[in-house]
Image (tube, rainbow, N blue to C red):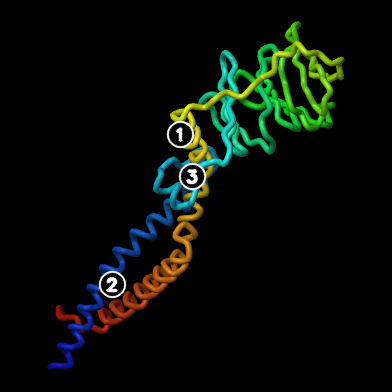
Amino acid sequence: MSNQRKRRNILKSLYLWHRYVGLFATLFIIFITLSGIALNHTDDLALKKQYISSQFLLDSYNIRAPTQLLQFKTPSHTVTQADDFIFINASDAITADAQIIGVVHLDEFLVISLTNALLLIDSNNQVVETLSGLDGIPSSISGIGYDKNQHITLLANDQLYQLDSNLNVEPVPWNDNIYWSSKNVISPTASEAVIQQYKSNIISLETLFLDIHSGRFFGSYGTLFFDLIGVLVLFLALTGIIIWARQRTKPNTHD
């Protein structure tokens, strides 16, 4: 009788453990399933174009403030560079591999001069063309501005160049009457806003979902956590088989 009672107690314990472990594992499996479905539809959900701004999550990724901030202004645009990101007004970031030298207008376009290229920006603040050395743009640009006739003028290696409406660049004689685009002084408030904008354009939702889905988000503990989940799922399978087997061998009391 005591052995039968012990078996009943063991079976009852298995029921309880199976129930609570199953509840915990189910929550995890639901999350993994939902995140997996989202990752399968990354383009449809635009996960690559959405970025996290939560300070907690940004700190978890050890995202730091940019090392350099530069800002240039025109009557209708504020162009700010934070390391390798360029922000035009409140638009999405543009990636750049060189420092901004200045900003001017060419007809309906905004021209951003980097040290090694010119970026042609449309009315939607999108890059429509990049002019580089292959297009005749001189290297080591150190200035961009207008002459008295509103012609765009570049300074590179102590030589002036003129950019016409067809985007052709030709060297021109030296001219002291050039209005050069110059940096704007960034206020502390504006600086903080740019820093937050910079941080909020680094980690996409796709990256976050991938890192959580794979356990990388939790660092070295993520691997151990996923190992634990694997053990729990194995435990559920084994206890489920035991409970099922016990139920099958249990005498039918209705006979």
- How busy is the neighbourhood of tag 3: few (under 14 within 10 Å), some, or many (20 plus)? many
Q: Residue at x 66, y 27 (%)?
A: 127
Q: Residue at x 80, y 27 (%)?
A: 156
The residue wearing badge 1 is 192
73 w.r.t. 199: above or below: above
Q: Earlier in the sequence, mark 2 or mark 3?
A: 2
Residue 183: x and y in percent read 61, 24
Quarter of the image that includes the C terminus: bottom left
Task: Evaluate whether residue 112 shows in this view.
Answer: yes
Looking at the image, residue 172 sits to the left or right of residue 208; the answer is right
Looking at the image, residue 4 sits to the left or right of residue 225; the answer is left
The residue wearing badge 3 is 205
Quarter of the rendering containing residue 132: top right
Task: Evaluate whether residue 45 shows in this view.
Answer: no
Callout 3: SS? helix
Label 1 vs label 2: CA separation?
A: 51 Å
Callout 2: SS? helix
Label 2 vs label 3: CA separation?
A: 34 Å
Label 1 vs label 3: CA separation?
A: 23 Å
Relative depth, front residue between 36 and 83: 83
- How busy is the neighbourhood of tag 2: few (under 14 within 10 Å), some, or many (20 plus)? some
Residue 89: x and y in percent read 53, 24
Task: Looking at this view, name the residue that lies furthest to the front.
Answer: 176
The residue wearing badge 2 is 18
Quarter of the rendering containing residue 83: top right
Q: Amino acid at mark 3?
A: Leu
255 w.r.t. 38: above or below: below
